[in-house]
Amino acid sequence: MRAVMEDVGLADPQLLARRQEFPDGITVAIQSIFPGCINQQIYNTLALRQLVPQGTDKCELHWTLFRLLKTTTRKCARCVSCRPI
């Protein structure tokens, strides 16, 4: 949209702010575990992508997103605007 309309943007850009979790500088790790299963870690997001065969000429892409049930107060304060809808 920004390429078409220059004044388009988020009302709160903090929504996309990211925080370096560890001092190693690594922000992306993607592993192919099996031809139909991919593990991905981008910043502090962990997901599993699975290609599920639906016959000889079709497949479905399943995404499983993981999150922590408990988090520190410092992390939680940063995510106030990221509540589920």
Image (spheres, grey):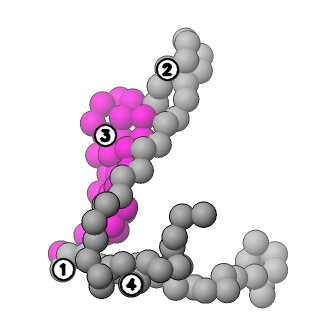
| Residue drawn where x is 35% and y is 29% of the image | 35
Q: Name the residue under label 3.
A: 32
Residue type at the position of mark 2: Pro
Residue type at the position of mark 1: Pro
Residue 28 is at least partly visible in this image: no
| Residue drawn where x is 55% and y is 24% of the image | 59
| Dot placed on the residue nearer the N-terminal end, 1 or 2 | 1
- CB of mark 4 within 8 Å of CB of mark 1? no
Magenta run includes residue 17: no
| Residue drawn where x is 36% and y is 35% of the image | 37
Q: Mark 4 points at which residue?
A: 77
- CB of mark 3 within 8 Å of CB of mark 4? no
Q: Please tell me in which quadrant of the rendered image residue 12 appears.
A: bottom right
| Dot placed on the residue nearer the N-terminal end, 4 or 1 | 1
Quadrant in which the N terminus is drawn: bottom right
Residue type at the position of mark 3: Ser
Residue span colored magenta: 24-50
Residue 39 position (above or below residue 35): below
Q: Mark 1 points at which residue?
A: 23
SS at mark 1 in the image: loop
Q: Does residue 69 appear to the left or right of 51 in the view shown?
A: left
- Point out which mark residue 53 bears: 2
Q: Does residue 9 appear to the left or right of 19 in the view shown?
A: right
Whole-percent x, y for residue 16 in the image:
51, 77
Residue 11 position (above or below residue 30): below
Main SS, magenta region, reads strand
Residue type at the position of mark 4: Ala
- Could you tell me how far apart the alpha carbons at marks 1 and 2 are, in whole angstroms? 40 Å
